[in-house]
Image (tube, rainbow, N blue to C red):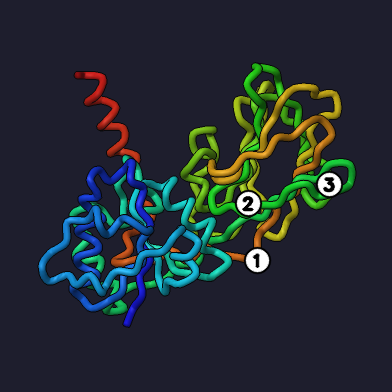
Amino acid sequence: MKVIGVIVNKNRDIALKYTSILANNIAEMGAKVLLLRGIPEELSLNESSSLNSFVELSNEKEIIDNAEIVISLGGDGSFLKVARMAYEKDLPILGINLGSLGFLTEIEKDDIKSAVSNLLNGNYIVEKRMMLDGSIIRDGKVIAKDTALNDIVISRGALSKILHLRAYLNDEFVDMFPGDGLIVSSPTGSTAYSLSAGGPIVEPNINLIIMSPICPHILYSRSIVTADDRIVKVVVDEDFAHEAMVTVDGQEGYEIKGGDIIIIEKSKYKTNLVRINPLNFFDVLRMKIYFRGECVKRNEIQ
């Protein structure tokens, strides 16, 4: 019997409408559903869905630890949250899109039933996505470590003070980046924050590292693309006396200060992305970006 963990962003799924559809379909096909404690009582269950199919656990970590596959309901942010919990377990993740864009969440709301059928019948592939490890070093000691699927961002704090960052590849000096900061992204992250900062679009199955400056205070500054075996080192200018941050996948933030060193490199871990009837990457790109543009136009007209 398959054991499917379900992690839902309740802010995206009002009254747990789509979680109910998902849970009913999984239960009706004879699989176990792992949910946070209290959620089964909030679901609208079909008569054919046995309560014995549902297992309530006290936290999301327990769901990750006991599932064979985990499903994320929400937007890309929800998927990233699940990915950050699941990568060490090498656990496949399927994303159901309840957000506005959904590069990582492949399944749309109307396709839940067919997605569950394909998932439980083994009609899917697992796409392995490169991740990045980041370390913050202060006075020669590692004070924080984290792993990202999309990106690791070094940025200034609340005050509008230019942040000066020195970037190195394998200890060879690349350039000084004065501005709002620097995005170091994976190929998966090339369509996230890096894209809005003018970075290149990269096919997600190509392993490389992208460095994109944020609002650079210099005319010739451009994104840099490098091999995935390079080690990126970013040094915060020693004279920088204001608040700055390292943000990992937009999920976790670490305060940094002048003189701190941020080391970023390809991780030994990968995120296992479940793909059901996968579309061409460029078809998805056109569809998602066009959809967002059309939404913006409609809002302007209204």
Q: Nearer the viewer, mark 3 or mark 1?
A: 1
Q: Is residue 270 above or below residue 15?
A: below
- Asked if 189 appears above or below 2 in the picture, the reply is above
Residue receiving disc 2: 209
Q: Position of residue 271 (x, y in %)?
A: 51, 63
Q: Give the residue at x 82% y 41%.
A: 173
- Across and down, in percent, residue 275 comes to 36, 65
The mark that comes first in sequence, 3 or 1, is 3
- Residue 264 shown left or right of residue 52 in the figure: right
Label at residue 172: 3
For the residue marked with disc 1, what is the amino acid? Lys
* Residue occupying image coordinates x 65% and y 31%: 155
Q: Residue furthest left?
A: 47
Q: Nearer the viewer, residue 255 or 156?
A: 255
Quarter of the C terminus within the rendering: top left
The first of marks 3 and 2 along the sequence is 3
